[in-house]
Amino acid sequence: MVTKIKKALDRTIMSITTVFTTVLVAGAIWQVVSRYFFNAPSTVTGELLRFLLVWTAILGATYAFGSNQHLAITFLKNKFKGKSRLGVRIVNDVFIFAFAILIMIKGGMEVVSITMTQTTPILNIPMGVVYSILPICGVLVVIYKLLLVKEYQEELSTGKEG
């Protein structure tokens, strides 16, 4: 069950980021064409691309946290073996979990609520919508880390690293 949930999350995030990346590439090409061939750069595309780049980056980071491919200082973890190494991984994930709850979800919700009345200059959408990726991805990181609990329980009982 845990594996199915994780695979579904992975597929969803990767599908969304693939669509966003495709739109980013197409938008960048349109920016070049409109600027150099028509001498009229598209301001709508420019603002949209900025927001999509942020969303894509944060979704990509969320996927990295979910697949444990995030940037980490591994020299400490690599000094340990067995249950000690697992302990370092668990402590690391507790910090990530706390960061996701306090900064991404709680702080993100505050930023979203504060900026919901502000609108973007060109697209005229609430800035809160732009910032909503923070709490969304915070929830996803929390789900990913909760899904690791079963893996950690198995590792503790068998003594083998996953």
Image (spheres, rainbow, N blue to C red):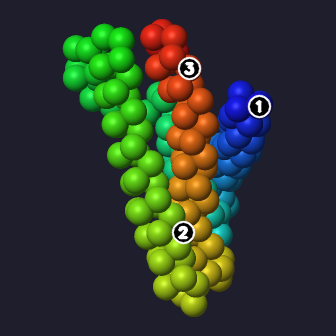
Query: Residue at the location (71% across, 27% down)?
Result: 3
Among the two numbered marks 2 and 1 on one chain, the one whose residue lies closer to the N terminus: 1
Residue 32 location, x and y as percent? Answer: 60, 51
From the viewer's side, name the closer residue of 55 and 90: 90
In the rendered structure, which amino acid carries the disc numbered 2? Tyr
Residue 121 location, x and y as percent? Answer: 56, 82
In the rendered structure, which amino acid carries the disc numbered 3? Glu
> Pointers 2 and 1 in contact (CB under 8 A)?
no
Circle 2 sits in a helix, a strand or a loop, which is it?
A: helix
Among the two numbered marks 1 and 3 on one chain, the one whose residue lies closer to the N terminus: 1
Q: Nearer the viewer, mark 1 or mark 3?
A: 3
The crowding category of the residue bearing disc 3, from other C-alpha atoms within 10 Å (few below 14, some 14 to 19, many at least 20), is some
The residue under label 1 is: 1
Q: Quadrant of residue 10?
A: top right
The residue under label 3 is: 154
Circle 1 sits in a helix, a strand or a loop, which is it?
A: loop
Residue 139 visible in the shown view: yes
Quarter the N terminus occupies: top right
The residue under label 2 is: 131
Q: Say left or right for 89 vs 157.
A: left
